[in-house]
Amino acid sequence: MERSAADKRRMTFSALGDTAVVVALGSGIDEAVLPRVRALAHLLGANRPAGIMDVVPAYATVTVFYEPGRLAANGPRPYEQVCRFIIDRARHLDSEAKKKTATAGRVMEIPVSYGGEYGPDLSEVARHCGLPVTEVMTLHAKADYLVHAIGFAPGFPYLGGLPAKLSTPRRPTPRGSVPAGSVGIGGAQTGVYPLSTPGGWQIIGRTPLALFRPGLAEPALLRVGDKVKFRAIAPEEFARWK
Amino acid sequence: MEISVIRGGMLTTVQDLGRVGHRSAGVPLGGPMDPFALRMANLLVGNAADAAVLECTLLGPELLFSADTLIALGGAEFEGLAAWQPKVVSAGSRLKLGAARKGCRGYLAVAGGIDVPVVLGSRCTYVRAGLGGFQGRALRDGDVLPGVDVARRLKDHWQIDPRILPGYAEAGTVRVVRGAQLDEFGGALFAAEFKILPQSDRMGIRLGGAKLTRIGGATELVSSAVAPGTVQVPPDGQPIVLMADAQTLGGYPQAAQVISVDLPLMAQLQPGGRVKFTEVTLEQAQKLAYDREHVLALLHEGLAQKFQ
């Protein structure tokens, strides 16, 4: 019965270790799945019962973190308890998803200085894609992007909408340190590193904007559902932002 | 009550049980690399299990206490203070922790906790983002930490049953449950012994010595949640065990997930140490977690009577 209830809402469950359940609502990067991801995260995140620690939406999944020791001790096994909680809260998933589809996100512009010292992998991406460097920049800046998830690092936006021509595998070995503001391509995804962190994406440029401001009540500049446009700027303009 | 930092040590940070509930903004859980040791250290000085303590790494700090208090070190054994043993210190006394003799990370609890500001629900330090803890960074020589005035003393001499204490070794076997892409690596994860590489940090422990190759080529995955304990495998085949400051999302294949009760063993392996992995079921992992919670609850009850 649980299975059929889950099937009806096209959810599949799997364990991420002994403290999390991953709910898959689709696969790949699919704008049609995003409203359901946002909706499920919203339904699960409100008034979390004891033992449910965190709810993390991303692309086609929502992951629910739990503490087995804080769930009902004499109920079903912890993993099953959490699956039941998710199925119960997902009763109104479809109507909630319709609401999310109707609410448009903001449009945010991010200035980027492409190539040179700010984008050390731009020529590698161009080589992989069989395109001139200028074409990579133009294509990347022309596209409309959508924030599918915030994660990896505080405020890091995972963006859908990368032109298929620019898809480039991650670097074989992650860099020990990628400078804050770096704009990268990882497979079919693009994003911006808000902080200097290790990272495996191909770095094609850098923005002078701060995407994570720890002092603010809402420290992440972008939210899931925001639309993003990149605007190419010269290195001199980058320098003026500082 | 103040604690003056004479020497900061190699990497000493303020940690509590972590920044729960902010992963959707990309803020990692953080907190201790070895949560068991942090909770135990707190219980040994009569604190709540989630009070803020100092996480010391390989080379400990030197500290000066401005008031009488009670301290305890959990986790790794350091020169200068016996581990798992509460100690009364008097105003003006110094504590010098030397090198870690066994294990990698020690948790120095002080009665009342370290009273740094709460940021996004936690006092833990996330150095990469400059978030929380003492000014968002590791301790430096000359820092002065705010403590709490509690003249807590021990009623009598006692020590906890050593059978509940973990043993840290240079080579460990760490239990995992299977990850989403485990089968794509054949049985390689369980066949090899891996070495802890020096590039390891609070974000992840990097493993060398053997490579994991994905059978059937490399399909790029779309990022989804990862967590402390996730064993992810980048294309170079060198696994990384994500730890306390792990990113919230990741797109590398996931071979396995270290079970909660064995994360401390992983955290206490020094660079150069060795590790093997063995698989258990989710049910076994959660039974072990329940048992550990039970031990901590009993200890909490038992210790409550021992302070005045």
Image (tube, rainbow, N blue to C red):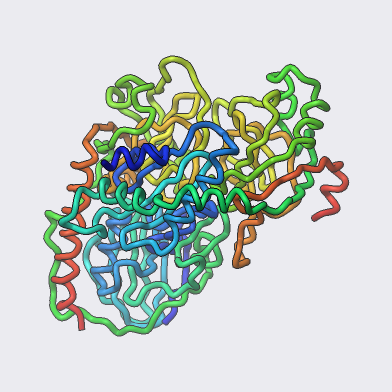
Q: Quadrant of the C terminus of chain B?
A: bottom left
Give whichever of A128, A87 is nearer the camera: A87
Residue A35: image location, x then y, percent? 55, 46
Give the quadrant of residue B297: bottom left
Residue B151: image location, x then y, percent? 30, 84
Q: Quadrant of the N terminus of chain B?
A: bottom left
Q: Is B152 situated above or below B120?
A: below
Name the residue at the top extreme.
B216
Give the quadrant of residue B184: top left
Residue at 33% from the left image edge and 42% from the top image edge: A5
Residue A14: image location, x then y, percent? 34, 38
Residue at 28% from the left image edge and 57% from the top image edge: B37
Give whichever of A166, A132 is nearer the camera: A166
Residue at 23% from the left image edge and 81% from the top image edge: B153
Residue A105: image location, x then y, percent? 67, 52
- Can residue B205 be seen in this snapshot? no
Give whichever of B264, B233 is nearer the camera: B233
Residue at 36% from the left image edge and 50% from the top image edge: A86
How many numbered circles are shown? 0
Q: Is A147 situated above or below A30?
A: below
- Can residue B243 be seen in this snapshot? yes
In screen coordinates, is A38 left or right of B59? right
